Image (cartoon, helix red, strand yellow):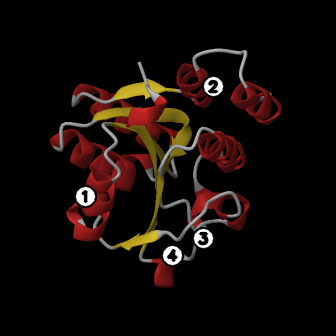
């Protein structure tokens, strides 16, 4: 089970034109907006990444407007190959990570493997990952599961983290998730 005090969100490279070119891009961006807003309300640490933003562009504004702080830039496909990102992940003291972003078969896949190598519990938010083709999404999810990642969805993860309905958090999240 996911636990609020142990869980963070790693948001991978939802940037520039590529974000609009991935399979089901409109739905993906919508689901990531919901996930980010819920994670902010739940006060989860959010580490958001940008792959070479000078070339690929910045995180799409419809998502970045819900994020606090600044993105961490990277050039490696596996985010944990970047010392400053690995340090941020380890300093968060989170043992569980939700992972969302693009592209599922490249940076998401390799970063998930990097988290698993650090003995983290990883849950890929399946409705918050995509690639330019559906086939690559399917392949990535299969391989990530093979290596030990679990799959979840926005609603499944958020309700698991909330644990109950009789809270102010539930009341704040309900209109966002519906």
Disc number for residue 143: none
Q: Contact (CB < 8 A) between labels 4 and 3?
A: yes
* Labels 1 and 4: the sequence-earlier one: 4
* Crowding at mark 3 (Cα within 10 Å: few <14, some 14-19, many 20+): some
Q: Tag 4's secondary structure?
A: helix
Residue at the image point whose x is 61% and y is 21% from the top: 159
Residue at the image point whose x is 45% and y is 53% from the top: 103
What distance separates the C-alpha of mark 2 from that of mark 1? 27 Å
Furthest-right residue in this view: 175
Q: Which residue, given by chain and number where applicable, does mark 2 sit on?
A: 155
Q: Tag 3's secondary structure?
A: loop
Q: Nearer the viewer, mark 3 or mark 2?
A: 2
The image quadrant where one finds the N terminus is top left
Residue at the image point whose x is 50% and y is 34% from the top: 125
* Crowding at mark 2 (Cα within 10 Å: few <14, some 14-19, many 20+): some
The reply to whether residue 26 is in sight is yes
- Which of the two residues, 97 or 172, is positioned nearer the viewer here? 172
Q: Which residue, given by chain and number where applicable, does mark 3 sit on?
A: 16
Percent x, y of residue 158: 59, 28
* Labels 2 and 1: the sequence-earlier one: 1
Q: Which residue, given by chain and number where applicable, does mark 1 sit on?
A: 80
The image quadrant where one finds the C terminus is top right
Q: Contact (CB < 8 A) between labels 3 and 1?
A: no
Horizontally, residue 123 falls left or right of residue 18, namely left
Horizontally, residue 143 falls left or right of residue 48, namely left
Percent x, y of residue 142: 34, 29
Q: Tag 1's secondary structure?
A: helix
């Amino acid at each position: 089970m996911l636990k609020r005090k142990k869980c963070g969100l790693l948001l991978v490279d939802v940037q520039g034109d590529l974000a609009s070119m991935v399979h089901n891009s409109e739905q993906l961006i919508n689901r990531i907006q919901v996930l980010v807003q819920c994670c902010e309300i739940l006060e989860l640490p959010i580490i958001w990444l940008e792959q070479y933003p000078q070339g690929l562009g910045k995180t799409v504004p419809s998502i970045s407007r819900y994020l606090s702080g600044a993105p961490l830039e990277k050039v490696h496909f596996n985010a944990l190959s970047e010392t400053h990102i690995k340090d941020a992940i380890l300093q968060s003291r989170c043992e569980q990570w939700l992972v969302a972003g693009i592209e599922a078969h490249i940076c998401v896949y390799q970063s998930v493997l990097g988290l698993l190598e650090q003995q983290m519990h990883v849950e890929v938010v399946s409705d918050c990952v995509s690639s330019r083709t559906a086939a690559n999404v399917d392949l990535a999810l299969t391989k990530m599961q093979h290596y030990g990642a679990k799959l979840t969805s926005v609603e499944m993860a958020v309700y698991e983290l909330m644990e109950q309905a009789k809270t102010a958090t539930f009341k704040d999240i309900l209109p966002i998730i519906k």
